Image (cartoon, grey):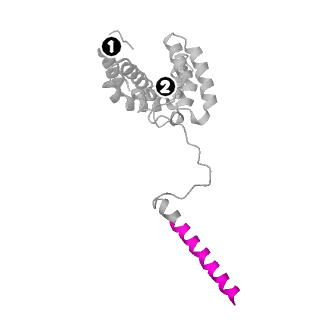
Amino acid sequence: MSRVRTALVILASLQGTAGALGSLAAATVPQDSPAPVTDSPAPRTSPALLPAEGLPPVRPGLERADSLLAAGLPLAASRLLAAELAAAGQQAPPPVVLAAARAQALVRSWSTVRRLLAERTWLDSLAGGEGRLLQARAELEGGQVTAALGHFDMVLPGLREGENLDPYVQALVGRARALQRLGRDSEAADAWLEAAETAPGISP
């Protein structure tokens, strides 16, 4: 009986010590401390690797092509931009497509201009409507006179407000030529007259 009592006393003593240690540990740990993390932290992305919002990606090919066009080398520019388009596929940015069409127009490859600009939604919003003007000229050179006239009529109001009148004169001349081919001579004469008044020296 004495052995049982002694065992009970020892057990009660051990339970009291464990409770005291638990209370001491709870007192030394702040209540708002987060639970210890056992997993390795996720790697952080360096801010330098994040894309700059609102900034277009650098296109060395486009810059080089613009330099070639400025130097009067449209054929070299057209070849460079053709390679850019082939690499980009359907994801080619509109400025690259427009530059390629511009280069093709300078080498008078109008069928390529038509193919590049067909069904593009940005013809009127990019570069002051240059894409629409190039498409109109390409349609006219390709014999699609009615379609060309429609494009010239669409682009003229915006070009009239621009600071550079050269595209406006090009559109007027193109419209006059289209009207002549359609037998609308009176309207063609008015278009020629307006072109001549805007840029003296223009003649049918």
What amino acid is found at the position of numbered circle 2 in the picture?
A: Leu
Residue at point 38%, 29% (across, down): 155
Label 2 element class: helix
Quadrant position of residue 167: top left
From mark 2 to mark 1, how far is it between C-alphas? 21 Å
* Position of the C terminus by quadrant: top left
Q: Is residue 99 left or right of residue 157?
A: right
Residue at point 62%, 49% (across, down): 40
Mark 2 surroundings within 10 Å by alpha-carbon count, few (fewer than 14), some (14 through 19), many (20 or more): many
Residues marked 2 and 1 touching at CB (< 8 Å): no
The kind of secondary structure the magenta stretch mainly shows is helix
Residue 13 at least partly seen: yes
Highlighted range, magenta: 1-23
Q: Is residue 152 above or below residue 3?
A: above
Q: Is residue 96 left or right of residue 38?
A: left
Q: Nearer the viewer, mark 2 or mark 1?
A: 1
Return the residue nearer the eye: 103 or 112: 103
The image shows residue 137 at horizontal and vertical percentages of 47, 24
Sequence order check: which comes first, mark 2 or mark 1?
Answer: 2
Q: What label sits on residue 199 in the rendered view?
A: 1
The image shows residue 145 at horizontal and vertical percentages of 47, 28
Q: What label sits on residue 153 in the rendered view?
A: none
Residue at point 48%, 63% (across, down): 27
What amino acid is found at the position of numbered circle 1 in the picture?
A: Ala
Residue at point 36%, 21% (across, down): 168
The residue that disc 2 covers is 140
